[in-house]
Amino acid sequence: MFSKKHQTNMLFALLVYSMFAILSLMLVLLGAQVYKRVINESDTRNSIRMTLSYVSNKIRAGDEMDKISIKEKNGTPILVISEEFDDVDLFTDEVVRTKIDTLIFFYEGELREMKSPTGGDILDLGLSEKLAAVDNFTFEKINGMYYITSTVGGKDYSMMVSCRSANKGEVTS
C-alpha cells in the first residue's frame, strides 16, 4: 500500500514524535522535583527566620530589668518574659494592674508559647500554642545576652540578643 520510502519516513516521524513526548515528560518530572526541593528549602528558611526573629523580638519587647528569666519544668527549659499592664475590671470599672508571663519553650518537636499568671504554676505544656515545627530549640543566658539556637533540617542556626536593661542601657556587641 505505502512505498518502502514512505513507510520509513512515517516511522522516522513517529520515532521523532515519541522521543519528543518522552523527553517532554522527563523534563516535566525533573522540573517537579526541582520545584519540590525549592519549596522545602524555602519552608526551612522561613521556619528558621520565624523562630529566631520571633523569640528575639519577644526578648527585646520585654527588655526591662529582671523581667526575663529561664525556668525549667520537667526538664524542659522555659524562657519566661514577665509583663505588667493596666486593665479595666469589667464588673467594677476599676483600673487593675495585671501581671502575665509569656512562656516560650521547645516541646514535642515544636516551638511553643503560652501565657500564665505571673508567679503561678506552669500548667501542662501540651496546652500551649504551637508556633513552628523545629528539630530542636535552645536558649541560654551568657553575660547578659541570650544565645538562641534553632535546629531545622539537621542544621543549627544561632542568634545572640543583647538586653539593654542587663547592661544599664549600654549596648554590648
Image (cartoon, helix red, strand yellow):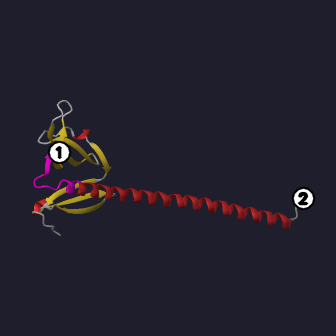
Answer left or right for 2 relative to 48: right
Q: Position of residue 93 (x, y in %)?
A: 18, 34
Answer left or right for 166 relative to 34: left
- Quadrant, the C terminus: bottom left
| Amino acid of disc 1 | Phe
**Residue annotated with mark 2:** 1
**Magenta includes 96?**
no
Comparing 164 with 20, the one in front is 164
Name the element at disc 2.
loop
Answer left or right for 52 relative to 1: left
Q: Residue furthest top?
A: 91
Residue at the spot 28% in from the left edge and 43% down from the top edge: 129
Magenta-colored span: 58-75
Residue at the spot 45% in from the left edge and 60% down from the top edge: 38
Task: Name the quadrant containing residue 30.
Answer: bottom right
| Amino acid of disc 2 | Met
Q: Position of residue 156 (x, y in %)?
A: 28, 61
**Residue annotated with mark 1:** 85
**Is 64 rendered above or below residue 12?**
above
Name the element at disc 1.
strand
Task: Name the quadrant containing residue 146.
Answer: bottom left
**Is 73 rendered above or below residue 161?**
above
Q: Which mark is residue 34?
A: none
